[in-house]
Image (cartoon, rainbow, N blue to C red):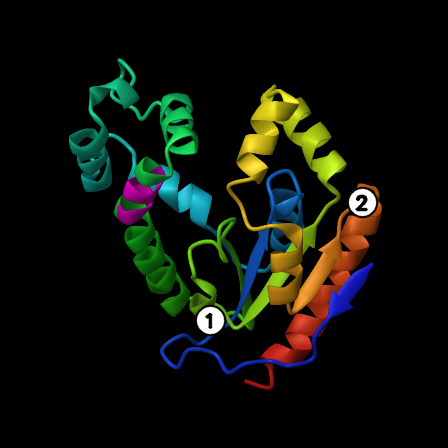
Amino acid sequence: MIERDTATPAPSPEINTFVVGLTGGVGSGKSTVADTFSALGVPVIDADQLARELVAPGQVALDEIVATFGTAVIKNNGELDRDAMRQRIYADPAQKSRLESILHPRIRQRIRTLLAGIKAPYTIVVIPLLLETNQADLVDRILVVDTPEKEQLKRVAARDGLSDNAVMAIINTQADRQTRLEAADDVIVNDQDISALTEHVQELHKYYMDISHEH
């Protein structure tokens, strides 16, 4: 099922591609949706991938993380210990905010730089915390991948080996489903198989190609 709002805000003037922000809760299927758009030839920018690049050894952001959180969040090989960092930020909102203050401005700038170099009709930007970090102004349209909570629990447990309590702790740090749905221009309800999901993406691809030519 796809739900759609026909309103289409104007794109940022310095960016020549229509920008669709893809978001959704943990385990909702954002990566699968993004990969399906990519297979159709649509440029995809992934904020999580940019974050991983920004915290690679030798990067300024990693140096700031060490200065802020100490060497306990660094592995012996010099890489960021993501599990240790995750445990810290989920246990302490203040530490989560400090990490975000280091990463989010850099991710935001990198997204804008990449978008400025894209000439395709439209681009997908995957930002899991699009609403939580108030970055909706980066995009022209918001696409939410929505999945029932029980499906989120099952998928994340299978993918990451986490307990239901650990997955719920992650879910509780994110915007609730109702907040995401109210902010969405388009919604893919991902509660069926991959063929149904692919069909939804193909339908939206045609729609985005059409509206992108209006801008």
Disc 2 residue type?
Asp
The residue located at (57%, 53%) in the rendering is 23
Q: Is residue 191 left or right of residue 143?
A: right
Mark 2 residue element: loop
Q: Is residue 183 left or right of residue 54?
A: right
| 154 w.r.t. 37: above or below | above
Crowding near the residue tagged with mark 1, few <14, some 14–19, many ≥20 C-alpha atoms within 10 Å: few
Q: Position of residue 138 (x, y in %)?
A: 43, 67
Crowding near the residue tagged with mark 2, few <14, some 14–19, many ≥20 C-alpha atoms within 10 Å: some
Q: Position of residue 4 (x, y in %)?
A: 73, 70
In the rendered image, which residue does mark 1 sit on?
Answer: 119
User: Tag count in the figure?
Assistant: 2
Q: Which residues are magenta?
A: 96-101
The residue located at (55%, 32%) in the rendering is 169
Give the number of the disc on residue 191. 2
Quarter of the image containing the N terminus? Answer: bottom right
What's the CA distance linking mark 1 and mark 2? 33 Å
Point out the frontmost of discs 1 and 2.
Answer: 2
The residue located at (81%, 56%) in the rendering is 199
Picture quadrant where residue 59 is located: top left
Mark 1 residue element: loop
Is tag 1's residue or tag 2's residue first in the polypeptide sequence? 1
Q: Nearer the viewer, residue 113 or 6?
A: 6
Disc 1 residue type?
Lys
Query: Secondary structure of the magenta portion, mostly?
Result: helix
Q: Is residue 186 visible?
A: yes
